[in-house]
Amino acid sequence: MTSFEELWRGLLPVGRSADSGGYQRFSWTPSDASCREWFVSEARSGGLTVEADRNGNQWAWWGASGPDAVVTGSHLDSVPDGGAFDGPLGVVSSLAAVRLLKARGFVPRRPLAVVNFVEEEGARFGMPCLGSRLMSGAVSPGHARELRDPSGVTWAAAMDSAGLDASGIGADPSRLGMIGTFVELHVEQGRGLVESGSAVGVASAIWPHGRWRFEFAGEANHAGTTRLVDRRDPMLTFAATVLGAREQAALAGALATFGRVSVEPNGTNAIASFVRAWLDSRAPDASSLATVVEAVTSLAAERGDRDGVKVTVTAESTTPVVEFNASLRDELAALLGAAPILPTGAGHDAGVLSAHVPTAMLFVRNPTGVSHAPGEFATTDDCLAGVEALADVLQHLATR
Ligand code: HGY
Ligand code: MN
Ligand code: MN
């Protein structure tokens, strides 16, 4: 069995639902703690020195930490009922690639590290890529400290309860300054590599995208005694908004999803008083994204006027288009035998870091393209091809 398969098998059961086979790996919960313990133990047994930075991101160093480091890695947290590969494939492949380089007798000429970034999915606290955004100063510590999970627990309280110290979270310029090049390997969340017949590809760009919280305030009342004309039902406004978002996205060649909603009081025989729902929208360019979000916001307000429902829209996180470093992109594609170059609509820590350091992404083929769901998959052969590719990239970057 290869070291990738050993590493993979060790992590696979952590945070996995016996019912759905999906993952519930949310920041600062017991399953996250188990993932972090796995990371420390496997990094150490691979001869790496492990530390956590002020934001809780874990760093495993090959040799001493230092400037102009070649850094790779990804995340271990998941979306609710997510797949096994989104995030963990990058972390496991990074640890396996280091072991492969050691087996090759390679000695890096510059510091090399594997990173596990915290809260990449934003599944518990709502802000994606929070660990890399905090480190790079893209999110203020004050804002992060007060982010709350659905039960009202703050980021700071959850981080403290997990045994870390949230008092020092925030920009980490000296650590960011250590990174010479960052490379993230990730399962492809799409079928581009299936269509091109390649196991591994190189990322060109990340679509602009964001999350907007829609709040619909109506009036609770009895489902059986309130005339239709007398109702102020936020579910009607919400439903019209969901359908409108789909229409607007189709018109703009974009994507729009309402995948998360909470209804108060959520009773079978009561008209809802309040609906909170989140729009995830993404588009090939910023103007199409703005067109979709503006159109959905105004159609929600118009429908709200008709329904007697007050609509409030709040941008929770927005990410501009990411164009990865073109010369690094082309250098790695050539190194990997003219590997296909392709964009993605999925956000990544690499997208955050690309604003600060030369950054690249490698994608590993996903036969169905399914992601953020238990069906997410990559074959062992393709995963091993990814490890070889990442090892070649790291060797190239740590030698030049
Ligand atoms: O939502 C995303 O695009 C990523 O998977 N965090
Ligand atoms: Mn994801
Ligand atoms: Mn991911």
Image: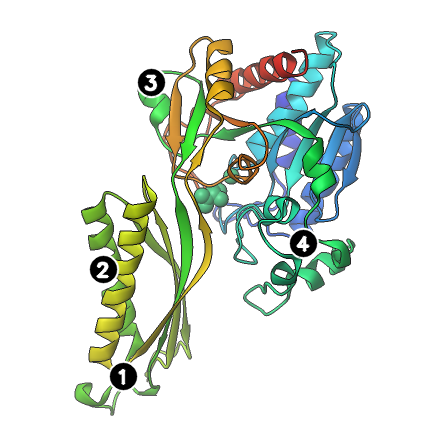
Q: Earlier in the sequence, mark 3 or mark 2?
A: 3
Tell me if residue 17 can be seen. yes
| Numbered circle sitting on residue 378 | none
Q: Amino acid at mark 1?
A: Arg
Q: Earlier in the sequence, mark 1 or mark 4?
A: 4
Residue found 25% across the figure and 66% down from its top = 298
Q: In the rendered image, which residue does mark 4 sit on?
A: 28
Q: Earlier in the sequence, mark 3 or mark 1?
A: 3
User: Which is nearer the eye, 287 or 79?
Assistant: 287
* Quadrant into which the C terminus falls: top right
- Give above or below for 150 relative to 188: below
* Quadrant into which the N terminus falls: top right
Callout 4: few (<14), some (14-19), or many (20+) C-alpha neighbours within 10 Å? many
Tell me if residue 373 can be seen. no
Q: In the rendered image, which residue does mark 1 sit on?
A: 232
Q: Earlier in the sequence, mark 4 or mark 2?
A: 4
Q: Is residue 206 left or right of residue 284?
A: right
Callout 3 secondary element: helix
Callout 4 secondary element: loop
Marks 1 and 4 sit apart, C-alpha to C-alpha, by: 39 Å
Q: In the rendered image, which residue does mark 2 sit on?
A: 243
Q: In the rendered image, which residue does mark 3 sit on?
A: 196
Marks 4 and 2 sit apart, C-alpha to C-alpha, by: 35 Å
Q: Amino acid at mark 4?
A: Trp
Residue found 62% across the figure and 31% down from its top = 73
Q: Is residue 285 left or right of residue 43?
A: left
Residue 264 spot, x, y in % from top left: 42, 77
Callout 1 secondary element: loop
Marks 3 and 2 sit apart, C-alpha to C-alpha, by: 34 Å
Marks 1 and 2 sit apart, C-alpha to C-alpha, by: 19 Å
Marks 3 and 4 sit apart, C-alpha to C-alpha, by: 39 Å
